Image (tube, grey):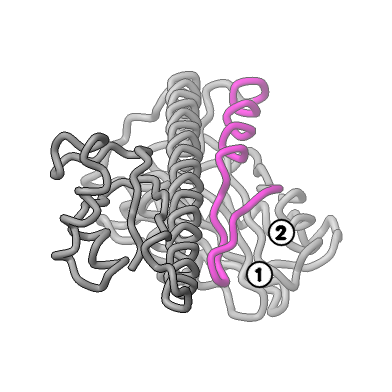
Amino acid sequence: MDVIAQHVNSAWARKVGGILIGRPSNTSVTIQAAIPADQVEEHGNEIAFLPLVWEQTYDVLIERYPGSRIVGWYHSHPGTGPILSDYDRRLHSVLFSEAPSVALVLDPVAQKSAWYGWVLGRLVPAGAAQQTAFVAGPARRGLAAVAAAIAVGVAAAGAGGYWIGRDRAPMSVSTASAQLRTRLRAEQSQARQLGERLAAAQKELTRAAAEKAAREAELAAIRTRLRQAAQSPRRDAFVLRFHVQPGDTLWGLAERVYGDPRGWKRIYRANAKRLPDPNILRVGQAILVPLP
């Protein structure tokens, strides 16, 4: 258990964790190795394992521990005691729901550790006899005591009913690795699709924003010319060339320009040759708007 001790002691002020590899049997679980999670996601004050950690773990299983499997996880709770939080229990239920799965919680500040596992469908401590003291630092003697306690503690918990009423069939490592990689590829594909949709949505938003800005600029020009027309003695000489935007109608244009939608007939008369049907305006079409 040197790997776990070194990992926890290297960052005793923050939470760290990793995956446990071993061999379950009807009455015990033998822990063979621990894979530290070099990359984790932090959720508040909790951690979650990234897909890369699982991929590395299955690679180690295939190359170095054929016939073994993932049997649980470990993580640290600096200064809060070796207990499972509600978040830890939910994570264990999702990722380590099979009966042989165990959890090791370590508090490097208090120098304590505790094992948890499934008993009759519930995630519970291994019991007072199975609690082990976690010795901080690289002392070989202390680490050996922890390793020895693992075999005793988990075996005793197993005898108490870890697998009662639960599936005992171990999953093939190669099968599990293939399933994990398939899931990762599917998630990566979904992420790419979401990225493409996001890019398309951003492009559409940019286009709509540019269209809105152009429309607002044209309306501002209309207001400016209206003010000029109001101050000019030759008001009939002012005619605005307006480009139709999506949703524009003669009725709505007359309301914006004249303040009275019934003025649409005046605009229609000025564009009789351009507008065969006053109810149909083509987007981008240029029409003349007589100003008052």
Q: Name the residue tied to disc 1.
A: 133
For the residue pair 284 and 272, the one nearer the viewer reads as 272
Identified at 62% across, 26% down, the residue is: 59
Q: The residue under label 2 is which amino acid type?
A: Ala
Give how far apart the Cα atoms at labels 2 and 1 are: 9 Å
Give the foreground label among 2 and 1.
1
Q: The residue under label 1 is which amino acid type?
A: Ala
Does residue 46 show up magenta in the picture? yes
Does residue 161 show up magenta in the picture? no
Q: Is residue 201 left or right of residue 169?
A: right
Magenta span of residues: 38-64
Q: Residue 228: horizontal and vertical position, in percent?
A: 49, 72
Tag of residue 145? 2
Residues tagged 2 and 1 counted as in contact (Cβ below 8 A) = yes
Identified at 31% across, 57% down, the residue is: 119
Q: Residue 235: horizontal and vertical position, in percent?
A: 40, 68
For the residue pair 85 and 131, the one nearer the viewer reads as 85
Q: Please identify the residue farthest to the front as the structure is shown.
A: 233
Identified at 66% across, 60% down, the residue is: 16
Q: What SS does tag 2 mark?
A: helix
Q: Is residue 126 visible?
A: no
Disc 2 crowd rating (10 Å Cα; few below 14, some 14-19, many 20+) is some
Residue 246 versus residue 197 in the image, above or below: below
Residue 155 versus residue 220 in the image, above or below: above
Picture quadrant where residue 60 is located? top right
Tag of residue 249? none
Q: What SS does tag 1 mark?
A: loop
